[in-house]
Amino acid sequence: MFEWLLKIPSALAEAAPAAGTTAAGVPDPSSPASLISMFLPMILIVGVFYFLMIRPQRKKDKKVKDMLANLKPGDRICTIGGIYGTIKGLREDTVILSVGKDNIEMVFARWAIRNVEEVTVENEGELLT
């Protein structure tokens, strides 16, 4: 049923060699055109990956690193768990937060901070600043 599919490679091997190929039908590896045609798709794929995936991720990582380096006491932050608080103190790898209207202190890892809030957040009808 699919015997025609098996005959395709042999039919291609019997075809006349094109320009820039050897007598066996294999492209001549020393010709510049064949080298360019072999490496150009790989170079284009690497370029597309760099500009669509690697470069934006590096920019985002740099922005997060700068935000974490510029933390200071008194900043309102949001953690990756969704907890809003005010920074009371900073250590090398940890942050002490004051949370809620009772100012309960919690300790978080510095990497667990999602962002610094620029606006105030309302909590149970009371405005937190």
Image (cartoon, rainbow, N blue to C red):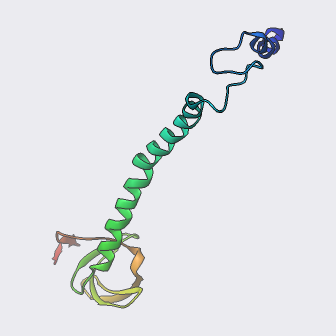
| Front residue (pair 114, 2) | 2
Q: Is residue 50 above or below residue 92?
A: above
User: In the figure, is residue 48 to the left or right of 85?
Assistant: right
Q: Is residue 110 above or below residue 47?
A: below
Q: Quadrant of residue 87?
A: bottom left
Exactly how many numbered labels are in the figure? 0
Q: Quadrant of the N terminus?
A: top right
Tell me residue 125's x, y (percent).
18, 71
Residue 78 visible within the image = no
Tell me residue 72's x, y (percent).
25, 84
| Front residue (pair 86, 109) | 109
Q: Is residue 118 above or below residue 73?
A: above
Q: Is residue 43 above or below residue 116?
A: above
Q: Quadrant of residue 23?
A: top right
| Front residue (pair 97, 27) | 27
In percent of the image, x 78 and y 13: which residue is there? 5
Tell me residue 13's x, y (percent).
78, 15
